[in-house]
Image (cartoon, rainbow, N blue to C red):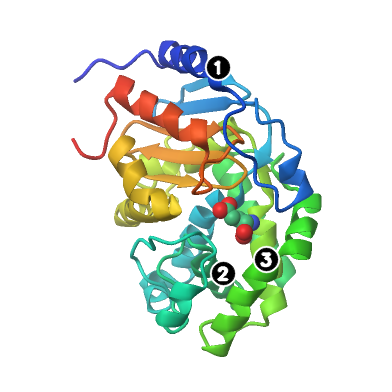
Amino acid sequence: MPEQPDIDHILREIYATLSPRFGEGKVADYIPQLARVDTRQFGMAVLTLDGATHLVGDAETAFSIQSISKVLMLTLALGKHGESIWNRVGREPSGSAFNSIVQLEAEHGIPRNPFINAGAIVMTDLLLAGHTPREAIGEMIRFVRSLADDEGIVIDQAVAKSEQATGDRNRALAYFMHAYGAIRHPVDHVLGVYFHHCAVAMTCRQLARTGLFLANDGRDPVGGGSVVSRSRARRINAMMLTCGHYDQSGDFAYRVGLPGKSGVGGGILAIAPGHAAIAVWSPGLNAQGNSLLGSVALEMLAQRTGWSVFG
Ligand code: GLU
Protein backbone atom coordinates (compact mmCIF):
# COMPACT_ATOMS: atom_id res chain seq x y z
CA MET A 1 0.00 0.00 0.00
CA PRO A 2 1.61 3.34 -1.01
CA GLU A 3 1.92 5.87 1.76
CA GLN A 4 -1.01 8.31 2.04
CA PRO A 5 0.27 11.73 0.90
CA ASP A 6 0.20 14.59 3.41
CA ILE A 7 -2.62 16.48 1.75
CA ASP A 8 -2.76 19.40 4.16
CA HIS A 9 0.93 20.03 3.59
CA ILE A 10 0.50 19.76 -0.20
CA LEU A 11 -2.44 22.20 -0.16
CA ARG A 12 -0.47 24.72 1.89
CA GLU A 13 2.41 24.40 -0.55
CA ILE A 14 0.16 24.91 -3.57
CA TYR A 15 -1.41 27.96 -1.92
CA ALA A 16 1.96 29.49 -1.06
CA THR A 17 3.37 28.85 -4.55
CA LEU A 18 0.37 30.28 -6.35
CA SER A 19 -0.44 33.21 -4.06
CA PRO A 20 1.86 35.66 -5.93
CA ARG A 21 -0.18 34.84 -9.03
CA PHE A 22 -3.65 35.31 -7.49
CA GLY A 23 -5.66 37.59 -9.78
CA GLU A 24 -4.26 36.16 -13.02
CA GLY A 25 -6.74 35.40 -15.78
CA LYS A 26 -9.93 37.12 -16.78
CA VAL A 27 -13.33 36.68 -15.13
CA ALA A 28 -16.29 35.77 -17.29
CA ASP A 29 -18.04 39.05 -17.98
CA TYR A 30 -21.19 38.07 -19.85
CA ILE A 31 -23.25 38.62 -16.68
CA PRO A 32 -22.58 41.20 -13.93
CA GLN A 33 -22.72 38.59 -11.14
CA LEU A 34 -19.62 36.87 -12.58
CA ALA A 35 -17.92 40.05 -13.84
CA ARG A 36 -17.71 41.57 -10.36
CA VAL A 37 -16.20 38.54 -8.58
CA ASP A 38 -12.80 39.37 -7.05
CA THR A 39 -10.22 37.44 -9.11
CA ARG A 40 -7.75 37.26 -6.22
CA GLN A 41 -9.80 34.58 -4.45
CA PHE A 42 -8.53 31.02 -4.43
CA GLY A 43 -9.87 27.96 -2.66
CA MET A 44 -9.31 24.26 -2.80
CA ALA A 45 -10.94 21.25 -1.11
CA VAL A 46 -9.80 17.64 -1.16
CA LEU A 47 -12.19 15.05 0.29
CA THR A 48 -10.68 11.61 0.60
CA LEU A 49 -12.60 8.34 0.66
CA ASP A 50 -11.94 7.86 4.38
CA GLY A 51 -14.18 10.89 4.97
CA ALA A 52 -11.39 13.39 5.71
CA THR A 53 -11.80 16.97 4.48
CA HIS A 54 -8.75 19.08 3.59
CA LEU A 55 -9.27 22.77 2.83
CA VAL A 56 -7.13 25.73 1.89
CA GLY A 57 -7.86 29.40 1.10
CA ASP A 58 -11.40 30.41 0.18
CA ALA A 59 -12.71 26.84 0.20
CA GLU A 60 -15.82 27.88 2.14
CA THR A 61 -16.84 30.74 -0.15
CA ALA A 62 -19.75 29.96 -2.49
CA PHE A 63 -19.28 30.53 -6.23
CA SER A 64 -21.34 29.88 -9.35
CA ILE A 65 -20.70 26.30 -10.45
CA GLN A 66 -21.87 27.02 -14.01
CA SER A 67 -20.91 24.19 -16.37
CA ILE A 68 -19.77 21.88 -13.59
CA SER A 69 -23.52 21.29 -13.24
CA LYS A 70 -23.35 19.48 -16.59
CA VAL A 71 -21.90 16.47 -14.74
CA LEU A 72 -25.02 16.43 -12.56
CA MET A 73 -27.30 16.87 -15.57
CA LEU A 74 -25.61 13.89 -17.26
CA THR A 75 -25.87 11.79 -14.09
CA LEU A 76 -29.58 12.60 -13.70
CA ALA A 77 -30.33 12.02 -17.40
CA LEU A 78 -28.59 8.63 -17.28
CA GLY A 79 -30.59 7.77 -14.15
CA LYS A 80 -33.85 8.67 -15.84
CA HIS A 81 -33.31 7.33 -19.35
CA GLY A 82 -30.35 4.96 -19.14
CA GLU A 83 -27.99 4.43 -22.04
CA SER A 84 -30.65 5.55 -24.53
CA ILE A 85 -29.44 9.13 -23.98
CA TRP A 86 -26.58 8.32 -26.36
CA ASN A 87 -29.09 8.36 -29.22
CA ARG A 88 -29.46 12.07 -28.56
CA VAL A 89 -25.89 13.17 -27.83
CA GLY A 90 -22.40 12.03 -28.85
CA ARG A 91 -19.43 10.99 -26.74
CA GLU A 92 -16.58 12.67 -28.58
CA PRO A 93 -14.47 15.65 -27.55
CA SER A 94 -15.66 18.68 -29.45
CA GLY A 95 -12.41 20.53 -30.10
CA SER A 96 -14.62 23.63 -30.17
CA ALA A 97 -15.66 26.38 -27.80
CA PHE A 98 -18.35 25.55 -25.24
CA ASN A 99 -21.04 27.41 -27.12
CA SER A 100 -20.08 26.67 -30.73
CA ILE A 101 -22.86 26.59 -33.29
CA VAL A 102 -20.83 25.61 -36.38
CA GLN A 103 -20.31 21.98 -35.41
CA LEU A 104 -23.97 21.51 -34.58
CA GLU A 105 -25.02 22.34 -38.12
CA ALA A 106 -22.45 20.03 -39.69
CA GLU A 107 -23.65 17.22 -37.40
CA HIS A 108 -27.40 17.71 -37.95
CA GLY A 109 -28.32 19.04 -34.55
CA ILE A 110 -26.76 16.17 -32.53
CA PRO A 111 -24.29 17.69 -30.06
CA ARG A 112 -20.83 16.15 -29.82
CA ASN A 113 -21.00 15.47 -26.09
CA PRO A 114 -23.08 16.28 -22.98
CA PHE A 115 -20.57 18.83 -21.67
CA ILE A 116 -20.75 21.42 -24.42
CA ASN A 117 -23.70 23.76 -24.01
CA ALA A 118 -25.72 22.16 -26.81
CA GLY A 119 -25.26 18.71 -25.26
CA ALA A 120 -26.23 19.89 -21.80
CA ILE A 121 -29.32 21.56 -23.26
CA VAL A 122 -30.31 18.16 -24.72
CA MET A 123 -29.71 16.55 -21.30
CA THR A 124 -32.02 19.17 -19.80
CA ASP A 125 -34.65 18.35 -22.40
CA LEU A 126 -34.43 14.71 -21.27
CA LEU A 127 -34.84 15.75 -17.63
CA LEU A 128 -38.07 17.56 -18.51
CA ALA A 129 -39.77 14.36 -19.66
CA GLY A 130 -42.93 14.06 -17.54
CA HIS A 131 -42.05 17.15 -15.51
CA THR A 132 -42.88 20.82 -15.42
CA PRO A 133 -39.80 23.08 -15.44
CA ARG A 134 -40.38 23.81 -11.75
CA GLU A 135 -40.42 20.08 -10.90
CA ALA A 136 -37.27 19.46 -12.95
CA ILE A 137 -35.45 22.26 -11.12
CA GLY A 138 -36.70 20.88 -7.78
CA GLU A 139 -35.47 17.41 -8.66
CA MET A 140 -32.03 18.75 -9.53
CA ILE A 141 -31.55 20.80 -6.37
CA ARG A 142 -32.76 17.90 -4.19
CA PHE A 143 -30.23 15.65 -5.93
CA VAL A 144 -27.40 18.12 -5.33
CA ARG A 145 -28.33 18.59 -1.68
CA SER A 146 -28.53 14.88 -1.04
CA LEU A 147 -25.15 14.24 -2.73
CA ALA A 148 -23.54 17.06 -0.77
CA ASP A 149 -25.43 16.07 2.38
CA ASP A 150 -26.16 19.76 2.78
CA GLU A 151 -29.63 21.35 2.72
CA GLY A 152 -28.02 24.79 2.58
CA ILE A 153 -27.13 24.61 -1.13
CA VAL A 154 -29.18 27.07 -3.19
CA ILE A 155 -29.67 28.37 -6.70
CA ASP A 156 -28.48 31.97 -7.04
CA GLN A 157 -31.65 33.50 -8.48
CA ALA A 158 -29.88 36.68 -9.62
CA VAL A 159 -27.46 34.56 -11.69
CA ALA A 160 -30.34 32.51 -13.14
CA LYS A 161 -32.11 35.73 -14.12
CA SER A 162 -29.01 37.23 -15.73
CA GLU A 163 -28.38 34.01 -17.65
CA GLN A 164 -31.94 34.29 -19.01
CA ALA A 165 -31.43 37.91 -19.93
CA THR A 166 -28.15 37.35 -21.79
CA GLY A 167 -28.73 33.82 -23.07
CA ASP A 168 -29.25 34.56 -26.77
CA ARG A 169 -26.48 32.28 -27.87
CA ASN A 170 -27.89 29.37 -25.87
CA ARG A 171 -31.32 30.21 -27.27
CA ALA A 172 -29.85 30.08 -30.77
CA LEU A 173 -28.38 26.63 -30.05
CA ALA A 174 -31.67 25.42 -28.58
CA TYR A 175 -33.90 26.72 -31.39
CA PHE A 176 -31.52 25.23 -33.90
CA MET A 177 -31.76 21.82 -32.25
CA HIS A 178 -35.53 22.19 -31.88
CA ALA A 179 -35.72 22.64 -35.64
CA TYR A 180 -33.93 19.29 -36.02
CA GLY A 181 -36.22 17.60 -33.48
CA ALA A 182 -33.18 17.15 -31.22
CA ILE A 183 -35.07 19.04 -28.49
CA ARG A 184 -38.67 18.08 -27.82
CA HIS A 185 -39.90 20.49 -25.15
CA PRO A 186 -40.52 24.21 -25.64
CA VAL A 187 -37.18 26.03 -25.86
CA ASP A 188 -38.04 28.48 -23.06
CA HIS A 189 -38.85 25.59 -20.70
CA VAL A 190 -35.61 23.77 -21.49
CA LEU A 191 -33.47 26.87 -21.13
CA GLY A 192 -35.24 27.96 -17.95
CA VAL A 193 -34.16 24.70 -16.35
CA TYR A 194 -30.68 24.79 -17.92
CA PHE A 195 -30.00 28.31 -16.60
CA HIS A 196 -31.08 27.30 -13.08
CA HIS A 197 -28.70 24.34 -13.19
CA CYS A 198 -25.82 26.66 -14.11
CA ALA A 199 -26.79 29.07 -11.31
CA VAL A 200 -26.28 26.64 -8.43
CA ALA A 201 -23.85 28.18 -5.94
CA MET A 202 -21.48 25.97 -3.98
CA THR A 203 -18.29 26.17 -1.98
CA CYS A 204 -15.26 24.03 -2.86
CA ARG A 205 -16.03 21.85 0.15
CA GLN A 206 -19.64 21.29 -0.94
CA LEU A 207 -18.63 20.65 -4.55
CA ALA A 208 -15.99 18.08 -3.68
CA ARG A 209 -18.49 16.37 -1.36
CA THR A 210 -21.02 16.30 -4.22
CA GLY A 211 -18.54 14.56 -6.51
CA LEU A 212 -17.22 12.06 -3.98
CA PHE A 213 -19.36 9.18 -5.31
CA LEU A 214 -17.46 9.40 -8.61
CA ALA A 215 -14.20 8.68 -6.80
CA ASN A 216 -15.72 5.65 -5.05
CA ASP A 217 -17.22 3.45 -7.79
CA GLY A 218 -20.56 5.27 -7.64
CA ARG A 219 -21.12 4.89 -3.89
CA ASP A 220 -21.09 7.57 -1.25
CA PRO A 221 -18.17 6.57 0.99
CA VAL A 222 -19.54 8.58 3.93
CA GLY A 223 -23.27 7.82 3.89
CA GLY A 224 -22.76 4.43 2.27
CA GLY A 225 -25.59 4.67 -0.31
CA SER A 226 -25.21 3.81 -3.99
CA VAL A 227 -25.67 6.80 -6.30
CA VAL A 228 -24.85 5.10 -9.62
CA SER A 229 -23.45 1.72 -10.59
CA ARG A 230 -19.70 1.18 -10.77
CA SER A 231 -19.69 1.03 -14.56
CA ARG A 232 -21.74 4.23 -14.77
CA ALA A 233 -19.33 6.05 -12.46
CA ARG A 234 -16.47 4.96 -14.70
CA ARG A 235 -18.28 6.19 -17.77
CA ILE A 236 -19.11 9.58 -16.28
CA ASN A 237 -15.43 9.90 -15.34
CA ALA A 238 -14.47 8.95 -18.90
CA MET A 239 -16.67 11.74 -20.24
CA MET A 240 -15.12 14.22 -17.81
CA LEU A 241 -11.62 13.19 -18.84
CA THR A 242 -12.26 13.43 -22.58
CA CYS A 243 -14.74 16.32 -22.73
CA GLY A 244 -14.66 18.20 -19.40
CA HIS A 245 -12.56 21.17 -20.49
CA TYR A 246 -14.00 22.05 -23.89
CA ASP A 247 -11.27 22.46 -26.47
CA GLN A 248 -8.62 22.17 -23.78
CA SER A 249 -9.66 18.68 -22.63
CA GLY A 250 -6.60 16.99 -24.13
CA ASP A 251 -4.26 19.45 -22.48
CA PHE A 252 -5.95 18.96 -19.08
CA ALA A 253 -5.70 15.16 -19.40
CA TYR A 254 -2.03 15.50 -20.34
CA ARG A 255 -1.15 17.89 -17.53
CA VAL A 256 -3.42 16.67 -14.73
CA GLY A 257 -4.32 13.12 -15.74
CA LEU A 258 -7.63 13.11 -13.84
CA PRO A 259 -11.26 13.44 -14.95
CA GLY A 260 -12.33 17.05 -14.45
CA LYS A 261 -15.12 19.46 -15.28
CA SER A 262 -14.70 23.20 -15.38
CA GLY A 263 -17.17 26.07 -15.26
CA VAL A 264 -16.88 29.72 -16.28
CA GLY A 265 -17.36 30.71 -12.64
CA GLY A 266 -13.74 29.55 -12.20
CA GLY A 267 -14.45 26.25 -10.50
CA ILE A 268 -13.15 22.81 -11.44
CA LEU A 269 -14.30 19.47 -10.02
CA ALA A 270 -11.67 16.74 -10.44
CA ILE A 271 -11.93 13.08 -9.53
CA ALA A 272 -9.05 10.86 -8.39
CA PRO A 273 -10.74 7.44 -8.55
CA GLY A 274 -10.02 5.36 -5.47
CA HIS A 275 -8.59 8.38 -3.66
CA ALA A 276 -10.52 11.64 -3.52
CA ALA A 277 -12.78 14.27 -5.02
CA ILE A 278 -11.17 17.67 -5.46
CA ALA A 279 -12.72 21.08 -6.03
CA VAL A 280 -10.71 24.17 -6.84
CA TRP A 281 -11.93 27.70 -7.42
CA SER A 282 -10.02 30.64 -8.86
CA PRO A 283 -12.22 32.99 -10.89
CA GLY A 284 -9.62 34.16 -13.46
CA LEU A 285 -10.06 32.18 -16.69
CA ASN A 286 -7.69 31.33 -19.51
CA ALA A 287 -8.45 31.81 -23.20
CA GLN A 288 -10.46 28.58 -23.35
CA GLY A 289 -12.73 29.64 -20.48
CA ASN A 290 -11.20 27.31 -17.88
CA SER A 291 -9.84 28.44 -14.51
CA LEU A 292 -6.23 29.44 -15.13
CA LEU A 293 -4.79 28.92 -11.65
CA GLY A 294 -7.30 26.17 -10.89
CA SER A 295 -5.74 24.01 -13.62
CA VAL A 296 -2.23 24.80 -12.39
CA ALA A 297 -3.23 23.90 -8.83
CA LEU A 298 -4.64 20.55 -9.97
CA GLU A 299 -1.50 19.84 -11.95
CA MET A 300 0.58 20.47 -8.82
CA LEU A 301 -1.72 18.32 -6.67
CA ALA A 302 -1.61 15.42 -9.14
CA GLN A 303 2.19 15.61 -9.30
CA ARG A 304 2.64 15.71 -5.55
CA THR A 305 0.10 13.00 -4.67
CA GLY A 306 0.92 10.78 -7.65
CA TRP A 307 -2.83 10.53 -8.39
CA SER A 308 -3.53 9.77 -12.04
CA VAL A 309 -5.88 7.55 -14.02
CA PHE A 310 -2.90 6.62 -16.22
CA GLY A 311 -1.03 4.51 -13.67
N1 GLU B 1 -24.03 29.46 -18.16
C1 GLU B 1 -22.95 29.35 -19.09
C2 GLU B 1 -23.51 29.27 -20.48
O1 GLU B 1 -24.42 28.52 -20.68
C3 GLU B 1 -22.12 28.15 -18.75
C4 GLU B 1 -20.86 28.08 -19.52
C5 GLU B 1 -19.68 27.43 -18.77
O2 GLU B 1 -19.65 27.36 -17.54
O3 GLU B 1 -18.78 26.99 -19.46
O4 GLU B 1 -23.08 29.95 -21.36
Q: Is ligand 1 less than 8 Å from the beta carbon at label 2?
A: no
**Which callout, 3 or 2, points at the residue further toward the start of the chain?**
2
Tell me the element at label 1.
Answer: helix
Tell me the element at label 2.
Answer: helix
Determine which of the numbered discs, if any, sits on residue 193 in the image: 3
Percent of width and height locating residue 233: 36, 51
| Residue at x-position 49% and y-position 62% | 116
Percent of width and height locating residue 43: 58, 26
Q: Quadrant of ligand 1?
A: bottom right
Spatial CA span between label 1 and label 3: 37 Å
Q: Nearer the viewer, mark 1 or mark 3?
A: 1
Determine which of the numbered discs, if any, sits on residue 121 in the image: 2
Spatial CA span between label 3 and label 2: 9 Å
**Which callout, 1 or 2, points at the residue further toward the start of the chain?**
1
Q: Is residue 48 visible?
A: no
Closer to the camera, 121 or 30?
A: 30
**Which callout, 1 or 3, points at the residue further toward the start of the chain?**
1
Amino acid on which the number 1 mark rests in the picture: Ser
